[in-house]
Image (spheres, grey):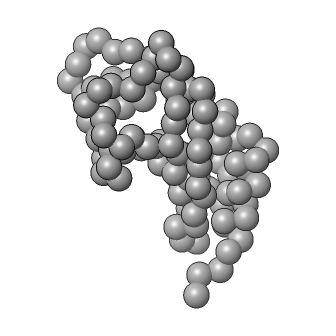
């Protein structure tokens, strides 16, 4: 992860993801991810409640990844390699099915 303004960073290796898919509107499904990292790539110590929101199409394609701390935008951004790990998880069969199911729910 890269803190905005810093010139050095450390890439995280994700070990596990917990997720929740929720339909936002007629176009988007939000997939909120809680992450567990490998022991040798811990999250920065100043993060309190880190999560990642993957904004996906109703067809299951991840469009944007937003880093959050305590459910607010945070000062860290993901590296390309971290994004690849997350996008691979989002495109897994299990998460794809959850996105499709969330997209098909009708708001009342």
The percent position of residue 80, horizontal first and vertical second, equals 49, 23
Pinpoint residue 44: horizontal percent, then vertical percent.
Answer: 33, 25
Whether residue 64 appears in this view of the structure is: no
Residue at coordinates 65% horizontally, 47% vertically from top-left? 61
Residue at the spot 35% in from the left edge and 53% down from the top edge: 71
Nearer-the-camera pick, 37 or 106 = 37
* Identity of the residue furthest to the bottom in this view: 108
Task: Judge left or right: residue 68 versus residue 23.
Answer: left
Please tell me whether residue 107 is drawn above or below residue 91 in the rendered image.
Answer: below
Q: Residue furthest left?
A: 5
Residue shown at 70% from the left, 41% from the top: 91
How many numbered markers are drawn? 0
Camera-nearest residue between 102 and 46:
46
Q: Which of 64 and 96 is in front in this view?
A: 96
Which of the 4 quarters of the picture holds residue 11?
A: top left
Evaluate whether residue 105 shows in this view: yes
Left or right of 18, for residue 94: right
Q: On screen, 73 above or below 26?
A: above
Q: In this view, does 61 lie above or below 105?
A: above
Picture quadrant of residue 62:
top right
State left or right for residue 38 relative to residue 2. Answer: right
In the image, is residue 18 above or below residue 102? above
- In the rendered image, residue 36, in percent from the top left (x then y), is placed at 52, 32
Where does the N terminus fall, quadrant-wise? top left
Residue 32 at x, y percent in the picture: 51, 51
Give the quadrant of the C terminus: bottom right
């Amino acid at each position: 992860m890269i803190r905005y303004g810093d010139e050095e960073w450390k890439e995280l290796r994700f070990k596990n993801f917990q997720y929740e898919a929720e339909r936002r509107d007629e176009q988007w499904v939000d997939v909120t991810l809680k992450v567990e990292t490998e022991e040798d790539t811990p999250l920065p110590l100043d993060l309190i409640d880190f999560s990642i929101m993957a904004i996906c199409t109703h067809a299951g394609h991840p469009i944007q990844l937003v880093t959050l701390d305590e459910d607010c935008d945070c000062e860290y951004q993901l590296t390309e390699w971290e994004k690849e790990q997350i996008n691979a998880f989002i495109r897994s069969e299990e998460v794809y099915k959850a996105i499709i199911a969330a997209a098909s729910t009708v708001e009342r």
